[in-house]
Image (spheres, rainbow, N blue to C red):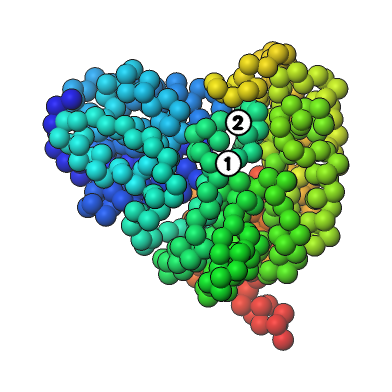
Amino acid sequence: MKPTTAPRTYRVKSFGCQMNVYDGERMAEMLGARGIVPAAEGEDADLVVLNTCHIREKAAEKVYSDIGRLTKGKTQDKAPIIAVAGCVAQAEGEEIMARAPAVSMVVGPQAYHRLPEMLDKAVAGERSTDTDMPAIAKFAALPERRRTNPASFLTVQEGCDKFCTYCVVPYTRGAEISRPYSDLVTEARKLVEAGAKEITLLGQNVSAWSGENDRGHKVGLAGLIRDLAQVDGLARIRYTTSHPADMDEEIIAAHGEVEKLMPFLHLPVQAGNDRVLKAMNRSHTVESYLRLLERFREARPDLALSGDFIVGFPGETEAEFEDTLKLVDEVRYAQAFSFKYSPRPGTPAASMDGQVAAEVMKDRLARLQDRLNRDQHAFNTASVGKTCEVLVERKGKLPGQWLGKSPWLQSVFFEGEDIAIGDLVQATLADAGPNSLRGEPVSAHERRYENA
Ligand code: 5AD
Ligand code: SF4
């Protein structure tokens, strides 16, 4: 590769999960600290970071087609400097380097703090790969948080030791590590100073977070949440994603007691049949999952539930799939994510017998999603008439329209004056659609009346 001029503008394109969004923001901050600015909307960037996801099919193909689009018809001095980051970089870094000469940097999710050094090399004409997995070193090397959204993310835990047989995460993100308590409290404070009103604590297996608090006591996720609730100016706390096996009494109690902890729980179940769950190595049964939900609902009766589902896991029969539909009918999720099983190279399920045909998976997914959509709409409809706080995240499409989130993570749009992004607006939920609700702000007069 020839040496090139240092980039003036960048674009970070994040795919996949919220942790990638968080990583993307942190990479952007590092580039910003170097004086590189975000490329304007519609303008080509001098440096493009493709922050990739490997969780399901076609991830690598998507990366190659993006690279093709970025370099099409361009000589090296006209094409952007390209970095491939994220989980595809971790899993397929060598192949990418061999197959895509236009890529200057391949950097894994645990190594992206080295992006600035790698960029220097790229400018000097040297390609580099870094897919090391040093425990936690990354966070210490990142610059301070200065800029954020009203609803922002904070990675507290990374990696996963659960080894569900379909999942690539334990291989791409590595073993479970918890970031230290004091770093998290500091980062949360910085986020709030920078304008965050809501923080979502992120981890591939966030319920496994553990640390030592400033009084020298061992604490789990619930303890961390209780302490973060003391941060002035922080109004809302959420966390994702949890594994049923790591949910303890303390986190259940926190949902009943910590006002700032929002009434929302994303607790993936994946399937509604015990044989399938066992083959997935999920370490919970349908019954134990349902009992757990019952305890959460006792602690917080208005809790909105969310889940993840996989249809067509190898060997899944029609009757076993129908057990998933039964589970959905029983739980009545407020929202959910559902996927066709996708064999991930190197995972145990990829070589299991009984791979399910594509048409069968398609049919099962459609049937499952019908029910999940029905329940989401029903949940929204049942919220009509409630008055709640909406955290304003952005302007809506129409003039004077704003968009925000309810405590139950529903999208709420409303019209109002004297409103700014980041406000917490009291609104009555007036109309429900399948994906959003219309709210009516409670006027200052009515608010005074209510408080009298
Ligand atoms: N195929 C389909 N879905 C998957 N997920 C994880 N791995 C796979 C796979 N191989 C889904 C799970 C998980 C979510 C993040 O992605 O439902 O909870
Ligand atoms: Fe993947 Fe299972 Fe770990 Fe979730 S708990 S990241 S599905 S291995």
- Count residues near mark 1 (Cα–Cα under 10 Å), then give few for <14, some for 14-19, many for 20+: many
Q: Earlier in the sequence, mark 2 or mark 1?
A: 1
- Tell me which residue sits at (32%, 19%) in the image: 98
**Residue assigned mark 2:** 167
Q: Are marks 2 and 1 in contact (CB under 8 Å)?
A: yes
Cα separation between marks 2 and 1: 10 Å
Label 2 near ligand 2 (CB < 8 Å): yes
Nearest to the eye among marks 2 and 1: give it. 1
- Tell me which residue sits at (68%, 45%) in the image: 243
- Tell me which residue sits at (34%, 53%) in the image: 141
Left or right for 337, reference 419: right
Judged from the image, the quadrant occupied by ligand 2 is top right
Q: Position of residue 252 (x, y in %)?
A: 75, 59
Which type of secondary structure does the marked residue at label 2 adopt?
loop
Label 1 near ligand 2 (CB < 8 Å): yes
Residue 12 badge = none
Q: Is residue 218 above or below residue 124?
A: below
**Residue assigned mark 1:** 160
Q: Is residue 142 visible?
A: yes
Q: Nearer the viewer, residue 15 or 270?
A: 270
Q: Is residue 440 visible?
A: no
